[in-house]
Amino acid sequence: MKVWLVDTGPLVAYLDAADPEHASVSKCLDAFSGRLATTNAVITEAMHLVASDTRGPRLLMELLNAAAVEVYDFAQRPELLPAVELMERYTNFPMDFADATLLLLAEGLGVDDLLTLDRRGFGSFRTREGKPMRLVMDLN
């Protein structure tokens, strides 16, 4: 079964009909029949961004549940150093913690498909093994 990693931007855009990327993200996600995976850092970012709408956090939780998104924890001590090292490697973009955890998850799951709106960052970022991510919004 196909697995896509999911970044913060598409989660927020999917929930916000006024977002310029809402239609393209919705079309992409609604057509996908595989598994979705993300990290706790991405969920934290998304919760922060949707909280300006009092219903936002609940809608995000309902989306995650309805789509059965697998959420992986990358805030434990063993994952912090590899995440920080990735962030240090990409200070010119910059890479945030959520971005770094997605690269670590890609390595851990052996997945390179990523649903993101951050084409500039993830178009340049590489895993620690040097693998690029496939940006699924650009493939569909």
Image: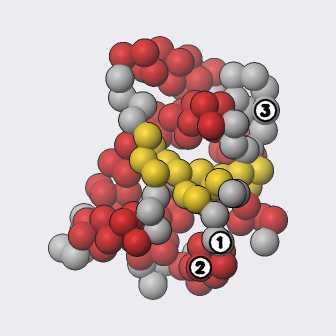
Nearer mark to the viewer, of 1 and 3: 1
Confirm or deny contact between disc 2 and disc 1 (CB under 8 A).
yes
Q: Residue at position x 29%, y 55% from top?
A: 48
Mark positioned earlier in the residue sequence (2 or 3): 2
**Residue that label 2 marks:** 30
Q: Amino acid at mark 1?
A: Phe
Q: Residue 54 location in percent, x, y? A: 18, 73
| Residue 24 appearing in the image | no
Mark pair 2, 3: CA separation: 27 Å
In the rendered image, which residue does mark 1 sit on?
A: 32
The single residue placed furthest to the front in the displayed view is 1
- Whether residue 72 sits left or right of residue 53 in the image: it is right
- Is the residue marked by circle 2 packed among few (<14), some (14-19), or many (20+) residues within 10 Å? few
Query: How far from the left and from the top, in percent, is residue 98?
Result: 47, 40
Q: Is residue 69 left or right of residue 55?
A: right
Which residue lies most toward the left here? Answer: 54
Image position of 69 (left or right of 104): left
Is residue 3 in sight in this rendering? yes
The label on residue 131 is: 3
User: What residue sits 43% from the left and 40% below the top?
Assistant: 72
The residue at the point 45 percent across, 21 percent down is 79
Q: Earlier in the sequence, mark 1 or mark 3?
A: 1
What separation in Å lies between label 1 and label 3 (alpha carbons)?
Answer: 23 Å
